[in-house]
Amino acid sequence: MMRIQVSPDRGRFALRRGVRQAAGTRPLPGCSALYGTPGGVMNLTFVNEAVAEREHEAADHGRERLLAVLRWLDAQGYRFVTATPGTHARVVKRADRQEARNVRDVMGWSLPFQPEVIPAELFELLRAADALEEQEDGRFKARYRVSSVHDTLFVHSAYPTLAEDSVFLGPDSYRFADLILAKMGDPKPGARILDYAAGAGVGGITASRAATRPYLTQADVNPKALRLAGVNAEFAGLDHQEVEANSPADVEGSFDLIVNHPPFMMDEAGRKYRDGGDLYGAKLSLDWTLEAVELLNPGGMFVMHTGVSIVDGRDVLLERLETDLDRGRFDWGYHELDPDIFSEDLDTAPYAEVERIAATGLWVTRRRT
Ligand SMILES: C[S@@+](CC[C@H](N)C(=O)[O-])C[C@H]1O[C@@H](n2cnc3c(N)ncnc32)[C@H](O)[C@@H]1O
């Protein structure tokens, strides 16, 4: 396993094998395909070059094979809109939904299936991409779901997304994409776009598809998310790189557009894709906003979709933004996109004081002077 950690002044910054060169970086001495930030502290662990090279090639093959699945589905006109986990559970509980009958049931509803219900070509593509699990009863299940957002396909984790490192795409992602398109305006050609906490990449890919020759950076703490986000960006035909990061300050460079949909729930299971920390789940939303706006070029824009606990009629995130987000340096606006989401979570202990959870949008422009 080969991994480099580069620790520039601003904090930990990790690059994995297969990540493309970031602006302002140069090849590490003695390495033909790895890049680091000049001046950074680097801890390199090499098994040996040949082993690392084989790992790299295997990762490339895996990506190509998943891409082949997306291309096959797209050529067949496949479309699937991911619903909430609650809706998904209701639908797949139905007596006639205990086994897949077609490609959408397999790739969208994540139902177990007999190989003959899907075309043999797709079955072979899935097998080659290591995207099938064989169950004890001899039936198969796809490891991934494929969903359509604004007419392009995204591969993400299959239902149910119980694992800590599940790769998220849900109804929130659709609202996030719509918010970005409504607010992003017309970035200059060649704009540098960052999707922080990219998940499967819906936000950054949607923004990039609406821009002219953009360069997309997708950052996430979850390597599995970065892998799938990379496949999805490749499928969308974009110039892109993926960066493993723990907070926006870990990301090198400056950007013309930053999009962000952070985890915002108080998740009893503490899942990374869902748990937003203190401030009734809004702590990451606040912290990442304040860090991300410092990465904006003058005139650049930050767009965030998040969820906020409303306590005694107060929006706990907006209260903090009013005090912490400097209106002298940034123009910003904020509004509720949906007054009532995830109401089923209000029954859980952490939400005892919360009267509703609202989906909200924030857009911030860095003043030029
Ligand atoms: C709610 S999901 C949003 C995913 C995607 N942006 C979307 O809208 O579909 C939140 C994402 O934040 C990522 N995440 C959680 N903690 C993080 C951290 N400290 N740094 C970077 N990403 C993180 C998760 O891995 C997950 O992909």
Image (cartoon, grey):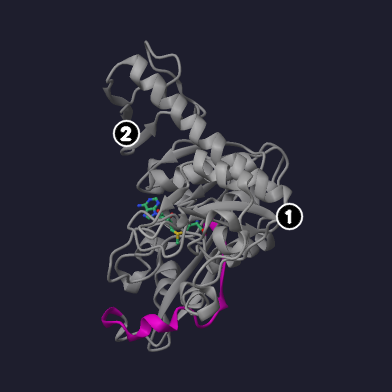
Whether residue 200 is situated above or below residue 34 in the rendered picture: below
Residue 103 location, x and y as percent? 62, 58
- Residue 288 in sight in this render: yes
- Residue 192 in sight in this render: no
For image coordinates 50% across by 54% down, the residue present is 156
Residue 348 forms part of the magenta stretch = yes
Check whether the beta carbons of the residues at disc 1 and disc 2 lie within 8 A of each other: no
**Residues packed near mark 2 inside 10 Å, few (<14), some (14 to 19) or many (20 plus):** few
Front in this rendered view, residue 252 or 153: 153
For image coordinates 27% across by 20% down, the residue present is 47
Whether residue 101 is situated above or below residue 237 in the rendered picture: below
For image coordinates 45% across by 70% down, the residue present is 322
- Magenta span of residues: 328-350
Per the rendering, the mark at residue 97 is none
Residue 57 forms part of the magenta stretch = no
Left or right, 182 with reference to 241: right
For image coordinates 59% across by 40% down, the residue present is 67
* Cα distance between the residues tagged 1 and 2: 48 Å
Amino acid type at image mark 2: Asp
Residue 238 location, x and y as percent? 64, 39
Residue to which mark 1 is pinned: 77
Among the two numbered marks 1 and 2 on one chain, the one whose residue lies closer to the N terminus: 2
Residue to which mark 2 is pinned: 9
